[in-house]
Amino acid sequence: MNFDPASSLQDTLHLDSATKGVNQPISDSATFAFETGDDMLKCFHGEKEAFLYSRHWNPTNLELSKALAAMEGTEAAWVTGSGMGAITSALLQLLKAGDHIITSVTTYGGTYAFLKNWITKYGVEVSFVNISDLKEVEKAVKPNTKVIYTETMTNPMLQISDIPELAKISKKVGAKLVVDNTFTPMIFSPIKLGADVVVYSMTKFINGKNDTTAGAICGSKDYINSLIDLNDGTAMLLGPALDPLRSSNIHKNLFTLHIRMKQHSYNAMFLAEKFQENNISVNYPGLEKNKNHNLMKSTMNKQFGFGGMIAIDLKTVENANKFMYIMQERGVGYLAVSLGYFKTLFSNSGKSTSSEVPENVQKEMGMSEGLVRYSVGLDNDIERTWQIIKECLQEIKFI
């Protein structure tokens, strides 16, 4: 695969045709006028492409969507007001009562709750599997399987999904492969690996500022058009549209993503190696001893590194809580959910972002109650940060 998401994104930059401004204008119109009533009627019937209403398309959102499609190598994209808005809309457009979806059991807690507790109320069957066990995935297939869903790097166990092999399975059975690439933008290009749809929480690395929630859906032009069809498009009818002011901000932030991902990856690798040297149980796919290392290395865009996410195991909730409290007090980062921020964020996943997953299921997937998930920030002096973390570990007598 020879695809450079950063260069593809860079090629979408252009001057505003009306003003020659280097940034695209913000359209804060909720509705748009037509020359004639006949033009409006044709738009409602899908016979004319035009801006109608910002729940459907907005010029500012369209510019961001074009940039995201270029970054992902898809024909089109559509942006939403949150990551969950993207995930739920993308899946509901592909599923109906009587259909079946196979999903990774190791997934974001909100996604798990949606698939376990919500979509099943409307007659959709769900099978949770170990997405790393391809035989288990194949065994879960049913005649009514319509979707296989996974995260490129799963949350919070940091498993690497074998997208090419999952794509083979999905195509063999006539299902769509939907991939959440939130943890690894630019590092992975799932569409190029065989996925059909890619979703994002742009709240995280893509925007990088933790100042808004936003999501994205990337796929074929036909699929995106079906999402926003005026009569039966899930995204159009459920209405998770992104505000154009926020869209403009994200669009500008997007063009520093390649630099930020490289620094996140550099810092995370540095800390992971230090944890390993000090005999702390650490999960980071960039480490050669990690069981996912070879798979990630063979399918990633190598120039962006192995990502900014690390998980360490401190065995107990008490250890994790005390450690995180001290780290926050010493300025390492913030005890907070979310990720992709310029400051390091950390949380005890089992009691926070994965709390929707029952404890017995957490144990089955191998999630320790003392797991601390790091979203490593953009620290300029990561050695200095490590020294503070080391002192925190010494204080709780873990090293």
Image (tube, grey):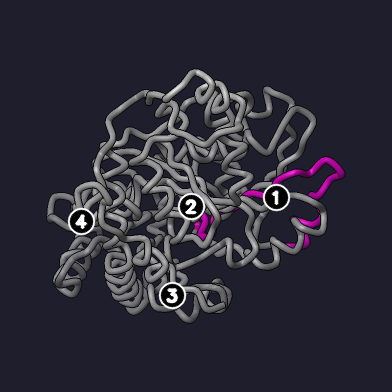
Task: Name the residue located 79 percent from the left edge and 57 percent from the top edge.
Answer: 138
Q: Residue furthest top?
A: 37
The three-letter code of the residue at mark 4 reads Val
Please rate how many residues cluster around mark 1, counting C-alpha atoms within 10 Å: few if below 14, some from 14 to 19, many from 20.
Answer: many
Please rate how many residues cluster around mark 4, counting C-alpha atoms within 10 Å: few if below 14, some from 14 to 19, many from 20.
Answer: few
Q: Which residue is mark 4?
A: 22
Percent across and percent down for residue 154 are 52, 55
Mark 2 or 4: in front is 4
The three-letter code of the residue at mark 2 reads Asn
The three-letter code of the residue at mark 1 reads Lys
Q: Which quadrant holds residue 161? A: bottom right
Q: Is residue 140 on the magenta stretch?
A: yes
Residue 329 vertical placement versus 291 (above, below): above
Give the label on residue 176, or none: 1
Instruction: Tell me which label, 3 or 4, sits earlier in the chain.
Output: 4
Q: CA distance from mark 1 to mark 4?
A: 38 Å
Highlighted magenta segment, given as a residue range: 134-157
In front of the other: 70 or 81 = 70
